Image (cartoon, helix red, strand yellow):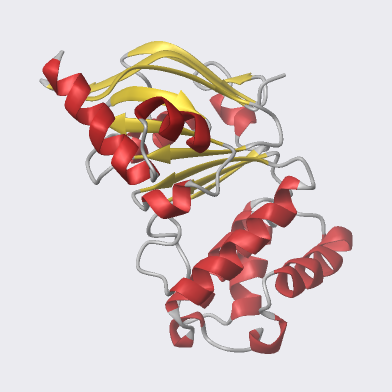
Amino acid sequence: MAGIKASSLTRKFGNTTAVDNISLEVEEGEIFGLVGPDGAGKTTTMRLLTGILDPTSGEGWVYGKHIVKEADSLKDYIAYMSQRFGLYEDLTVMENVNFYADIYCVPPKERAGKIDELLGFSGLTPFKDRLAGKLSGGMKQKLGLACALIHTPKVLFLDEPTNGVDPVSRRDFWKILYDLLKQKVTILYSTSYLDEAERCKRVGLIDKGKLLKCDTPDAIKAECGAKTLEQAFISIVKEYEKS
């Protein structure tokens, strides 16, 4: 079973096509990078696949659940960390995690052990009594991830989670993600950082709502005769604009 599957997924807002006939498949336990500039359609694609938005046309499945017909039951299997994840800055780290545990109806008997695991996992245990508003940008992102993982999702959607985060915190964040892959969590990761996209198993290059190329970073670079994914992306966009 594929972790994520999209078939001719399209979303229009009036005369604007934000997502244009996108088809892709992400394997279970894979980290797949959705890569493109601001306004490329990355966030809209994620909102479609998480059941937040309905497609204008096309279909999608996440962990075997249809994104429209089974949107309610889908929520039990996924976590979506948006660019502005809803942390409460006047609550402590522990209070934020407990709040999300309540939202996801995590049973009390499972909660304490899961919270200890997540805070240790993300390096937040020493800061559990600190107000979220007093955390650094990187620590806020790690807290957001801990909150998103409290109900043990099968599929994790991360929308530009390291945007504006310092390099050390980005490295720590990726270490956490690689550990999640060992647990067979499927991850869809959007980013505009081409160097960061190189860490993904496969990437989909998206621009103006269209998925232009989908393959491993090395395969895309080899096909374009490029040394970096950034060079390859520029080459692919130019070729598409000519067609």
**Closer to us: 79 or 4:** 4
* Residue 37: % across, % down: 26, 44
Q: Residue furthest right?
A: 109
Q: How many marks?
A: 0
Asked whether the viewer can see residue 151, the reply is: no
Quadrant of the frame with the N terminus: top right
Query: Is 65 positioned to the left or the right of 6 in the image?
Result: right
Residue at the image point whose x is 64% and y is 68% from the top: 97
Relative to 178, does residue 238 appear above or below in the rendering? above
Residue at the image point whose x is 49% and y is 84% from the top: 135
Residue 31, quarter of the rendered image: top right
Relative to 142, does residue 174 appear above or below in the rendering? above
Residue at the image point whose x is 22% and y is 41% from the top: 39
Relative to 136, does residue 114 appear above or below in the rendering? above
* Residue 232: % across, % down: 33, 36
Relative to 139, does residue 41 appear above or below in the rendering? above
Residue 47, quarter of the rendered image: top left
Query: Is 145 positioned to the left or the right of 182 in the image?
Result: left
**Closer to us: 127 or 215:** 215
Residue at the image point whose x is 86% and y is 67% from the top: 113
* Residue 70: % across, % down: 58, 20
Asked whether the viewer can see residue 49, the reply is: yes
Residue 225, quarter of the rendered image: top left
Query: Is 15 positioned to the left or the right of 30 in the image?
Result: left
Query: Is 133 positioned to the left or the right of 147 in the image?
Result: left
**Closer to us: 183 or 132:** 183
